Image (cartoon, coloured by chain):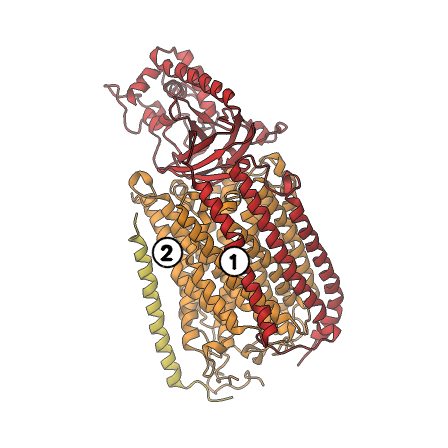
Chain colours: A yellow, B orange, C red
Amino acid sequence: MSEPFSAEDLARRRTASRRLGWAIGAAVFALYLIGFLFKR
Amino acid sequence: MSYATTHPAGHHDEHHPSGLLRWLTTTNHKDIGTMYLTFSLIMFFVGGLMILAVRAELFQPGLQLMRPEFFNQLIGVHALVMIFAALMPAATGFANWMLPLMIGAPDMALPRLNNWGFWLLPPAAILLTLPFTLALFGIGDGAIATGWTFYAPLSVQGGMGVDFAILAVHILGISSIMGSINVIVTIFNMRAPGMTLMKMPLFAWGWLITAFLLIATLPVLAGAVTMLLTDRHFGTHFFDAAGGGDPILFQHLFWFFGHPEVYILLLPVWGLMPHVLSTFSRKPTYGYKAQVYSFIAIGVLSLIVWAHHFFTAGMPVPALIYFMFSTMAISLPLAVLFFCWIATMWKGAMTFETPMLFAVGFIVLFGIAGLTGLVLADVAADAQYHHSYFVVAHFHYALFAGGIMGVMTGVYYWLPKWTGHMYNETLGKWHFWLTVVSFNLTFIPQFFLGLAGMPRRIPDYALQFAEFNAISTVGAFILGISQLLFAWNIWSCIRGGPKAEARVWEGAEGLEWELDSPPPHHSWETQPVIK
Amino acid sequence: MSHCTCQITKSGSAITNLGIRWVGSFWALVALLLPGASHAEYKFNFPEPVTPVARETLHIHNEFMLVITILFVVVFAIMIYSMVKHRKSVGHQPAKFTGPTGTVQWFWALVPFAILLFIDFILMGIPAVNAIIEMEDTKTRADMVLKVTGMQWKWQYEYPGTDIKFISTMSTPREQINNAEAKGENYLLEVDNPVVLPVGKKVRILMTSTDVIHTWWVPQFGVKRDAIPGFLRETWVNIEKPGTYRGQCAELCGKDHGFMPIVVHAVPEPEFLAWLEQKKAEAKAAAGGADRTWSKDELMAAGKEAYDKQCVACHQAAGQGLPPAFPALAGSKIVAGPLLDANGKIIKDSHVDRVLNGKPGTAMQAFRNSMSDVELAAVITYERNSFGNQAGDMIQPAQIKALR
C-alpha cells in the first residue's frame, strides 16, 4: 500500500485526459467529413 | 489485503444524491456500469420478444400472424436492438465496472462524458421502437423495414421508420464514440504506476482495440446514414444511379463499419475469456503476448475485409480474390486465440462453475462460428450461401454463442464481485444447459435450410423448408424462456445470497480481486502495488 | 479464502461429467453426419447441381465442410480430453507454464498455424481462385444472351435480338398463402411465365433492376447475382440437364420479397427454338393491339386482368390501397383528374404520368417498361371506372404508343 494519488498527479492526469479526449473527438469528426468527399 | 477500509478523511461526509437523481447525475463508473448492464438486459428481452414473434410466424408455411411489411420491420429492429442496445451496452457496462478496478484507477478518466454516454441510450432505444407505436395510431407505416443493413435504394424508398432509425443510429454512434474515447484515455492515462501496457489485463487490451475500431468506423457509418438521409429528403443522389450515384457505394460504406463492428462486439469477450479460463483452471494465462498481438492483428485486418459481405454484387475478379484471401487471413490470429484458450486449460486443475461452463460453451460454439465463417469467405461457394439461412446461422453462432454467451460468462463471473453475494449455482447450470441445447436446436437446422436454398428475410417459405423451420422455432422459444432463469438469478443475487469474498473464485488473479465484494463506492483511492 | 467453491465442484462435477459425455457424443454424431450428408438427400446439402459452376461449387463446399469438420473434431477432442483429465476433482495439480517451453511445445504451437495457413491459401484458396475466374467469365463462347430485370415484385425477362419480353409473376394464389386453401406442391415457387432456356448452351445473363436491389438465385444453377438499378451485372449458366429449376429473390426488396420466385424450364434446343417462334408471334400480336380502336368493355376486361396481375399487390382488390405507403385508388384525386392535356401530351403527376413513369423515391415504378400499350391503356381505363371511380373516360393503346 502506498501514497494515495497526489493532487498534482491527479490534476496532471485529468488535463492529459481532457486533451487526448478532444484530440480523438476531432479525429472522429474529420473522418466523418472525409466520408462525404468520397467519389460519388 | 483489502483496500476497502482505508480512505483519507473528508470523503466520509461526501454527499451523494439518492433515488432517481443519483442515477441521472452519477459520474461513478460502478453506477454507470450498472446502468449500462441493466439497460442491456432489458433491451435483450425486447429484441428477443421481437424475434420470437418472427419465429412464431415462421413456424409453418403460410402467413398466420402478420403481414410481410410488419415481418420486415421486426427482423430489422431485432438486429438493431440486439447489436446496439443489448450487446454493445453490455460490453460497455463491463468496461465501466471493471477497467478502473483492473488497472488500479479511481474511476474512468472522463466521468461526466461517461454519464452522457449512457444517458444517450434510452432516448435512442425509444426512437428505434417508437415507429411501431405510432403506426398503431395510424401515423406512418411502422419502423424501418429494410433489415439492419439499410441498403439503398430500398431505404431511400422507406417510410418515416427509416428516418427514426437513422437518428437512433447517430445517437447510438455518438454514445459509443464517447465511451470509446473514455476507454482509450483511461487506459493511456489512468493506469496505476507499475502497470505497464504489457502488464495490463487482457480484458483491458480487448477493450483498447475495440475502442480504436469504434472511433475509426462509426464516423463512416454516420456518414453513410447521413448521405441516406439527404438522398431521402434533400435531393442528393449519392446512391441513385439515375443521378450519377451508386447503390453499391452504400454497401461499401456500411460494411466498412459493419465488419469491424462484429469484432467490436467480440473483442471485449475475447479479452474476458483468458480471465475466466485462467481462474477456473487455476493456471496463469497462456500466451499473453500472443493474444495481445492477435487482438491487434484482428483489429487491423478487420478494417480491410468488408466486401466479403457483398460478393454477389458484381465486383471485379481481382477484388473478389483479394477480399477472399484477406478474410481468410483473419482465421490465423483467431486460431492463435483458440490455441491460447485451450492451452490455458491444458494441465490445469479445472472446476466447472457456471462461468466456466459458459466459457467452454463459448469456445466450442464460437469455434463453429469461426469455421463456418471460413467457409463463407470462399467466393465460389458463397454464391450459394450469400443471403441464405446459412449466413443467419453463422452469425448467430458468432454473436449469440460468441457475444451473448460471452456476456453471460462475464456476468456470472463478476456478479458476486459487483453485488457481494453469490448467485444461485444450480440455477446458473440449468440456464447454461437449457441455453446451449436450445440454441443448437434453433440454429443447426438453419444451416441446412440455407444449404437447401432458403433465402433470408422472407416471411413465408416453400414446403420443403417446413420441417427445419418448425424445429428452429421450437428451439427459439425454449431459448427465449430459458433466459428468464438468467434474469431471475441476477435479480435474486442483487437482493441477497451467500456472502462473496473479495477473492470470489479460488484461482482468480488480478487487482479487482483484492477489493471487497462489493467494492467501495470509491475504489483505489490508495494506489495499489503492482507486482 | 477458498470458500464454497469446493462444495459446488463436488456436486457440480457429476452433472458436468455426464454433460461432457453427452456434448461429446452429440458432436461426434454431427461430425459423422456432415461428410456423409454430402451424398445424402436434398435436405442436408445443396440441391442437385445441373451446371458446371454448380458442380464445382458443390465440390468446393463438400471439401471445405470436411476440412472444418476434421478441424472441429480434432481440436475439441483435445479440449474435452483436457476437461476430463485436468480437473481438480480428480486431483490434477495445475501446471504453471505461460508459453511454449522447449522444442516439442514450439512444434505444437506452430504446426497448427502452418496447417491452417496451408488450408486457407493453398488447399482451398487455389481451387477457389480457379472457380472464381471460371464463374466470372461470362463472355467466352457464349451462345446466347438472356436479360433479367428485377422489379418490385416480379422478374422481367428479355431475349435480346428478338422482341420477346415478358413478366414472370408468382402464380401461387393468395388464398394458399392466407391458409384458406391447401398449399400446392410448388407453393411459392411457381410463376405464370417461366423462363425457357436451351440445354447445353452457354447463356450469358445480364441483370439489372428498375427500382431497388434484387438478387437472382437458382440454387441448382449455382448462380446468384445482384440486380442493381442503373447498372448491368452479368453471370452465366450452361444447363446440362432438361428440367424445371426453381429459385427465389435473394435480396430484401420490400414487402413481397419472399413472393417473387424464378422458374426456368430447360429444354433441348429444338424445343427452345420452337418456343421462341411461338413467343415472337405472340409479341407481334400484342404489339398490333395498338393499331386498332378498342371498345370500353374490351379495355375494362383487359384492364381488370392487368390490374389483378400488376397492381393488386399494393393497391388491393377494391382499390383501397395500404396507405400511406400504397395510396388508395378509390376516390383518388389523381385518378379522377384529366387524362391528357389539350394537345394529347402527358400532364405531370397525372394518372397517366404515374402509371407510365412511376413516382421516383417510392415503390411505384415506371410501368411503361413492363406493360404493353394495350395493358397500360386498359389498366388506366379500368382504374378510372372502378372502385367507385366514375371518370367515365377511356384511353386508347394508340394514345399510349404516341406518348412513348
Q: Give left or right: position of B24 versus B515.
A: left
Q: Chain of mark 1?
A: B
* Residue name at image x 38 percent, y 31 percent: C365
* Residues at discs 2 and 1 in contact (Cβ within 8 Å): no
Q: Give left or right: position of B288 versus B424.
A: left
* Residue name at image x 39 percent, y 41 percent: B153
C345 w.r.t. C237: above or below: above
Q: Nearer the viewer, mark 2 or mark 1?
A: 2
Outermost residue toward the bottom in this view: A2
Among the 4 quarters of the image, the one containing residue A15: bottom left
Give the distance between the C-alpha atoms of the residues marked 2 and 1, in whole angstroms.
22 Å
Horizontal and vertical percent position of residue B113: 40, 68
* Residue underneath mark 1: B86
Among the 4 quarters of the image, the one containing residue B339: bottom right
Q: Nearer the viewer, residue C229 or C93?
A: C93
Q: In which quadrant is the N terminus of chain C drawn? A: bottom right
* Residue name at image x 61 percent, y 38 percent: B465
Label for residue C402?
Answer: none
Horizontal and vertical percent position of residue B522: 49, 78
Label for residue B220?
Answer: 2
Q: Nearer the viewer, residue C326 or C156?
A: C156
Horizontal and vertical percent position of residue C402: 29, 19
What amino acid is at disc 2? Val
Q: Secondary structure at mark 2?
A: helix
In the rendered structure, which disc, 2 or 1, sits on the residue that comes first in sequence?
A: 1
Q: Nearer the viewer, residue B376 or C59?
A: C59
Horizontal and vertical percent position of residue B118: 45, 64
What amino acid is at disc 1? Ala
Q: Give left or right: position of C316 versus C287.
A: right
Category of crowding for the residue at label 1, using alpha-carbon neighbours closer than 10 angstroms: few (below 14), some (14–19), many (at least 20)? many
* Residue name at image x 42 percent, y 56 percent: B257
